[in-house]
Amino acid sequence: MTFFAVRFSARPPDESHLYGHHKIENLSALMETLLLLATCGWIVREAVHRLQHQKAEIAVTVWSFAVMLTSIAVDVSRSRALARAAREYHSQALEADALHFRTDVWSSAVVILGLAAVKIGNAIPGWGWLRNADAIAALGVSVLVIWVSVRLGRRTVDELLDTAPAGMEQTIRTTVESVPGVRDCHGVRVRRSGSVVFIDLHVLVDGRQTLAQAHELTETIEAAIHQIAPDADVTVHPEPF
């Protein structure tokens, strides 16, 4: 899912998608978040059912720990690589995939604790209650994954609904009004689509300027905005003061 989302979102704008295809990444991140939440719901259901009714005999061997430790080593490297790429390219799809593998690391670590507790419960008769540690560990992992997934899901929905980044409007207004020749900045609109931020704004400038001078000023304004939002697609509308 992430592979195709990143591939298609990189396509240039066309007649049907004049702003590009960046929202595909947001949709992919939302789908991955929903899949994680659905998986957690199923795990919680099975864990509760096992604790209440079904006593499962878990065979704990050296291979159990070897597989989980190998899984942790692989997932740590994958999640770190994806997280670096997500930060570099501001990709929510890659961020969701990094979250997926990071939750695998957490779950694998808790599984190891659960297996160790089951092993102790099998070895020491008086500690038989530890045999339920595997199901309890599953519940703990599910709660953690649900919490992180909901946070990412909220951010994904915010971007799909074109929610402006917090404080960005005021920062842009302050930056633009500090440019010499700009008397006022208003009508600021900010929306993020995948890795690209679209910024539209109106400025009041000296009405006696020539068209060439006004155009030069708008380029100066765009350069100032790119200092705070390097990947932004900026549109400046000058109005005579």
Image (cartoon, rainbow, N blue to C red):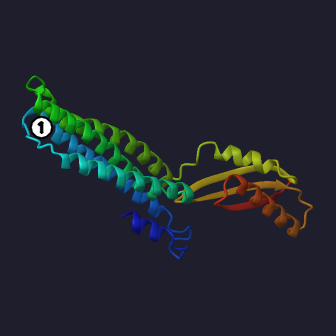
Residue 48 at x, y percent in the picture: 16, 36
Quarter holding the C terminus? bottom right
182 relative to 146, above or below: below
Residue 171 visible in the displayed image: yes
Front-most of residues 55 and 14: 55
Task: Report the residue that reaches farthest toward the top.
Answer: 126
Front position in the image: 165 or 148: 148
Instruction: Give the residue at x 46% y 53%.
Output: 80
Q: Nearer the viewer, residue 35 or 238?
A: 35
Q: Where is residue 107 in the image (x, y as percent from the top left)?
A: 30, 43
Q: In this view, does 206 lie above or below 8?
A: above
**Residue 100 in view of the camera:** no
Q: Quadrant of residue 50?
A: top left
Q: Residue furthest front?
A: 62
| Residue that appears at 51% across and 59% down | 85
Q: Quadrant of residue 232?
A: bottom right
- Name the image quarter holding the N terminus: bottom left
The answer to whether 122 appears left or right of 38 in the picture is left
Q: Name the residue under label 1.
A: 50
Apparent side of residue 109 relative to residue 13 in the rendered image (left or right):
left
Q: Position of residue 113 (x, y in %)?
A: 26, 36
Residue type for callout 1:
Arg
Residue 8's x, y, as percent? 45, 71
